[in-house]
Image (spheres, rainbow, N blue to C red):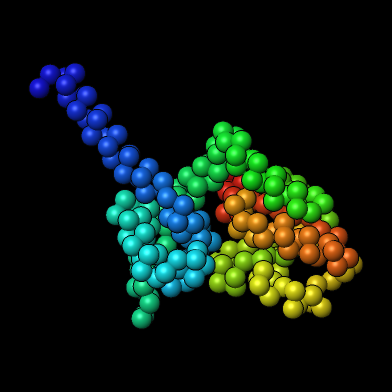
Amino acid sequence: MTTTNLAETYRDAAYTQLVRVGKALGNSSRLKLLNNLVQGPKTVEELAKTVGLSVGTASKNLQLLKQVGLVRVERRGNYVVYDLASAQVPQVLSLLVDVSEQALPELRALEQQLSAQWPPLPQLSITDITRELAISQPYLIDLRPADEYQVAHLPGAHNFPYDQIMQRLAEIPRDRELVVYCRGRLCGYSEMIGQQLKDRGYQVQIFQMTVWEWQQAQAQ
């Protein structure tokens, strides 16, 4: 085999392997599963409930992600727990959202349609919230489930899961500016809950990035 043929054979085989990962990512259910694992390890039952799949369908998709090395499995007592296989996976997901927002007017239109349901709330960038944490110390509300909050959260954040917060309004101070966040740009809860809080007289800003994205910015 000539040098040229060897290089071309290698190239074609290498691209075939890249396509395997691309195919695994080319499914909305699998992207949802990965995005939820960015928040922390979960059992297949927890993932299925969160993403809205049957346990069987979630398990099948997780196995496909495992086959291409995007997730890993660990047994913890009687439970099988899934986790991301490397710290690069959330980086890929974050970059995918960045590229999609820039390239796809349809995605931008979806984001605008959601925001247009209510009067706009102030949105904080990573730089904004870092500055606010250092200067004004707003009251941060983490809308994610307790297990995700326990894995990681913004400094000083208080956990009010989105399906419980309206029953716990008495715990939220009315003399502090609130910053509400959830699972990132593909999660609409921060805007929806933020508006509900504003309607009840609170001063609200929202943070649409993930905890992981904020952590990465601080590490740079």
- At horizontal 75% and vertical 77% (from top left) the residue drawn is 168
- Compared with 188, 4 (above or below) is above
Task: Please give left or right for residue 76 compared with residue 124 in the image.
Answer: left
- At horizontal 42% and vertical 69% (from top left) the residue drawn is 54
- Compared with 69, 147 (above or below) is below
Extreme residue in the left direction: 1
- At horizontal 62% and vertical 50% (from top left) the residue drawn is 185
Residue 123 visible at all: no
Instruction: Name the quadrant of the N terminus.
Output: top left
Task: Please give left or right for residue 13 compared with residue 64 in the image.
Answer: left
Badge count: 0
- At horizontal 83% and vertical 62% (from top left) the residue drawn is 198
- Compared with 8, 177 (above or below) is below
Extreme residue in the bottom direction: 78
- State the image quarter where residue 157 is shown: bottom right
**Where does residue 19 sit, x and y in percent of width and height?**
32, 39
Instruction: Name the quadrant of the C terminus.
Output: top right
**Where does residue 33 sit, x and y in percent of width and height?**
46, 59
**Where does residue 100 sit, x and y in percent of width and height?**
55, 39
Which of the two residues, 208 or 129, is positioned nearer the viewer here?
A: 208
- State the image quarter where residue 11 is shown: top left
**Where does residue 37 sit, x and y in percent of width and height?**
48, 60
Residue 183 visible at all: yes
